[in-house]
Image: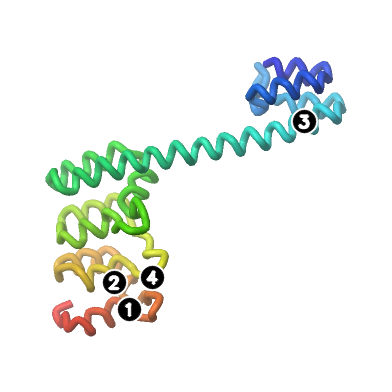
Amino acid sequence: TALHLASQSGKAECIRVLLQHNANPLLRDTGGRRTPLDIARSKHFTRCSKLLEEGEAMYRKENSHQEKLKQKKRVAAAWNDLEQACMDVDDQSFVDILDKYEQPIAKLAIFQPRDTNEESLVLRIARANRVGLLSLCLIHLGRPPNTPTTKETLLHFACCHCSDETVSIVFGLFPDMVNMADYQGSTPLHIAVSLNKLDV
């Protein structure tokens, strides 16, 4: 690349201009071995090396930020698709839609609320007592995280808001949740007793 050539000949000003115009300092030469920084260091071009070190750090930071924005958009799209599917389709069709997304994106869309004032989709599914769909989601995606503010597990939520069958599904998949305490020190068993849910 032009950055490789500028590094080879020690042209620091040229490197600076190329980096300002978003030249990629992480690309390797045709042999796949050396970056422009590798070349500048091997030639002991101190100023060029410093510019390229800063350029690499900035390029990584920019790409990381761009990737986060892209992921946020993918999660939002998945959330919208899956929210609609929660209401409109049968359990297997929902899982087929879920399969369209990479698992990390699907997990974020199902397990995290779109914003702080909303329930996550997994909680909506549980609250609606769609036990077949809940079971498929949990088998497919694994253990949901605890609610950050209350430290409440899905089993706490099910004991408070859902049918005995929903509680049974969650407990069957994640039996260790029965011993987990929320921020008030209550376990799911405490909640079931306080609500007089004797079958639970």
Q: Amino acid at mark 3?
A: Leu
Q: In the image, is 28 to the left or to the right of 63?
A: right
Q: Dot 3: few (<14), some (14–19), or many (≥20) neighbours within 10 Å?
A: some
Identify the amino acid type marked 2.
His
What residue type is disc 4 on? Thr
Q: Is residue 177 left or right of residue 162?
A: right
Q: Which residue is mark 4?
A: 150
- Residue 10 position by quadrant: top right
| Label 1 to label 2: alpha-carbon separation | 7 Å
Q: Position of residue 180 (x, y in %)?
A: 37, 74
Q: Which residue is mark 2?
A: 156
Is the C-beta separation of discs 1 and 4 under 8 Å?
no
Please say if the residues under marks 2 and 4 sit with CB atoms less than 8 Å apart: yes
Badge 4 element: loop
Q: Quadrant of residue 168?
A: bottom left
Residue under numbered circle 3: 51
Label 4 with label 3: CB-CB less than 8 Å: no
Of tags 3 and 1, the one toward the viewer is 3
Asked if the residue under mark 2 is in contact with the one under mark 1, i.e. CB atoms within 8 Å, the reply is yes
Q: Are marks 3 and 1 in contact (CB under 8 Å)?
A: no
Q: Earlier in the sequence, mark 1 or mark 2?
A: 2
Up-down relation of residue 8 to residue 172 (above or below):
above
Mark 1 lies on residue: 187
Q: Residue at x 37, y 49 (%)?
A: 108
